[in-house]
Image (cartoon, rainbow, N blue to C red):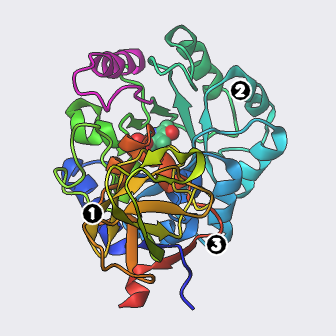
C-alpha cells in the first residue's frame, strides 16, 4: 500500500550538486554540512550518498556520535562544539572535531591531560554575532588553545558569513577581510564559505568550504534559481487527490471561509497538511502540481488536507498524483509564498511522512 503522503529523495541529484561545489572550489576540501537530519533528508542516508566529501559537519555532539556509530570514519566537525564535560569526553572518544567558540569551553579544555587527542577549529566572530570570539578576544583564545595538551596542532580557523546570500551587501567582503587580517599567517587551515559564499564570493573560498543547502539542490539566493546555478532538487514531496467536487460561485472553502469562489469551479482535496510539514502559511494561489500541471492552492492549509482549484482540470479524479514541491515546482517558490525560506520546508517534513530513495522505484 502506497502511503498518501511521501517524500522521494534523488541522491544522484545530490551527487550532481556535490560536483557543482567541486567546480566552484576545485582546490578546496569539502565539508558537507548535514546537520538538522541532513536538512530533513536523513542524516545517514545523506552521509552515505556523499562518498567524495572530505568531511561532514553537524551541529551537535549526538549527531556526530550517530554518524560514528553507523560506521562513518571521515572527519566530522561539530559546529556547536560542546557545553558540558561529558560532551567533551564524547568528542574525544568518538574522534569528532571540536569547534571552540567560547571561554567556557577553553576552561574545560585546559583541564584535560590527554595528549593530542582532539582536532580543533577556533571560531572567530567577524560580524555574524552568533558563535565565536570577537576580534579583540582572538589572540588570548588562540594562546590559550595552544596551551591545551588535548588539542592537536595546528589550530584550524573558521568564521561564518552573515549575509553572503545578498550579493550587494558589503558586509561579506568586510567579514572576509577581518578574518584574513586577524589570523594573518598563523598555521592551520581556514574555512569561511557556506553555499552562498561558494557560489557568490570567490574570496570566501579557502582551504575548506562548507556547503549545506546547495547540496540539496536549493539556491541560497532569493533572486537566482537553483536551475540557474545548475543545482538539481533532491527532495520531492508527493501526495494524491482524495476528493473532487463542484462548488458554485460565492461558496466559501475551508476554515474561516477564507476563500470565496469567484466563479463556479471544481475543487480538489489533497491529502497533505501542516502535520506533514506543508506550511500552514502557504497563501491562496500557491502552486501545486496535479497530474504534472500547476493548479492553485485555495483556502487555509489544514492539518491533513489542502484544497486546490481544479478549474483547469475538471476531469481530475481521486487518486491522481500530486507534487507539492520537487522537479518543476521548486521548494524555493513555495517558501516565498509562505513567508519562509526553503531550509525550513525541507527540515520540517514530519515523522509520519515516509521517505523513499527514488532509485528504488525505478
Ligand atoms: C549551516 C551552516 C553551514 C551551511 O550553510 P548553507 O547556507 O546551508 O550552505 C555552513 N557553516 C556553518 C557554521 C553552518 O552553521
Asked if ligand 1 lies within 8 A of label 2, the reply is no
Label 1 crowd bin: few (<14), some (14–19), many (20+), radius 10 Å:
some
Numbered disc 3: secondary structure: loop
Q: Quadrant of the C terminus?
A: bottom left
Which labelled disc corresponds to residue 106? 2
Q: CA distance from mark 3 to mark 1?
A: 41 Å
For residue 28, side relative to residue 246 (left or right): left
Query: Quarter of the image holding residue 93?
Result: bottom right
Q: Is residue 180 magenta?
A: yes
Question: Which of 233/330 is in front?
Answer: 330
Residue span colored magenta: 160-183
Kindly report which numbered mark, 2 or 3, lies closer to the viewer in this rendering.
3
Query: Quarter of the image holding residue 335?
Result: top left
The residue at the point 33 percent across, 49 percent down is 262
Tell me which label, 2 or 1, sits earlier in the chain.
Answer: 2
The residue at the point 41 percent across, 58 percent down is 54
Q: Position of residue 22 (x, y in %)?
A: 25, 55
Q: Is residue 113 placed above or below 262 in the rendered structure?
A: above
Q: CA distance from mark 2 to mark 1?
A: 55 Å
Amino acid at each position: 500500500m502506497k502511503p498518501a503522503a511521501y517524500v522521494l529523495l534523488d541522491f544522484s541529484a545530490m551527487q550532481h550538486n556535490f560536483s557543482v561545489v567541486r567546480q566552484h572550489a576545485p582546490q578546496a576540501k569539502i565539508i558537507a554540512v548535514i546537520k538538522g537530519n541532513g536538512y530533513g533528508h536523513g542524516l545517514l542516508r545523506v552521509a552515505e550518498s556523499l562518498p567524495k566529501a572530505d568531511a561532514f559537519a553537524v551541529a551537535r555532539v549526538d549527531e556526530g556520535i550517530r554518524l560514528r556509530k553507523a560506521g562513518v570514519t571521515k572527519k566530522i566537525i561539530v559546529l556547536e562544539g560542546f557545553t558540558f564535560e561529558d560532551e567533551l569526553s564524547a568528542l574525544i572518544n568518538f574522534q569528532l572535531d571540536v569547534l571552540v567558540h567560547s571561554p567556557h569551553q577553553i576552561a574545560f579544555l585546559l583541564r584535560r591531560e590527554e595528549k593530542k587527542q582532539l582536532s580543533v577549529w577556533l571560531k572567530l566572530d567577524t560580524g555574524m554575532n552568533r558563535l565565536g570570539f570577537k576580534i579583540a578576544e582572538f589572540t588570548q583564545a588562540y594562546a590559550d588553545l595552544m596551551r591545551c595538551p588535548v588539542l592537536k596542532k595546528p589550530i584550524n580557523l573558521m568564521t561564518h558569513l552573515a549575509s553572503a546570500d545578498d550579493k550587494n551587501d558589503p558586509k561579506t567582503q568586510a567579514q572576509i577581510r577581518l578574518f584574513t587580517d586577524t589570523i594573518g599567517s598563523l598555521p592551520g587551515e581556514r574555512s569561511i564559505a557556506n553555499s552562498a559564499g561558494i557560489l557568490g564570493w570567490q574570496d570566501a573560498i579557502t582551504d575548506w568550504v562548507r556547503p549545506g543547502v546547495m547540496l540539496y539542490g536549493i539556491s541560497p539566493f532569493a533572486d537566482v534559481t537553483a536551475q540557474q546555478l545548475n543545482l538539481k532538487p533532491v527532495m520531492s514531496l508527493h501526495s494524491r487527490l482524495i476528493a473532487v467536487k463542484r462548488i458554485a460561485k460565492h461558496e466559501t472553502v475551508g476554515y474561516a471561509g477564507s476563500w470565496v469562489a469567484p466563479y463556479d469551479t471544481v475543487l480538489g482535496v489533497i491529502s497533505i497538511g501542516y502535520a506533514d510539514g506543508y506550511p500552514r502559511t502557504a497563501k491562496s494561489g500557491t502552486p501545486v502540481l496535479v497530474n504534472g500541471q500547476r493548479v492553485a492552492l485555495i483556502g487555509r492549509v489544514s492539518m491533513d488536507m489542502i484544497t486546490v482549484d481544479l478549474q483547469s482540470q475538471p476531469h481530475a479524479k481521486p487518486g491522481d498524483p500530486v507534487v507539492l514541491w520537487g522537479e518543476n515546482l521548486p521548494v524555493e517558490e513555495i517558501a516565498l509564498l509562505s513567508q519562509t525560506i526553503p531550509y525550513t520546508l525541507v527540515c520540517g517534513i514530519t515523522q509520519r511522512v515516509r521517505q523513499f530513495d527514488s532509485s528504488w522505484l525505478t
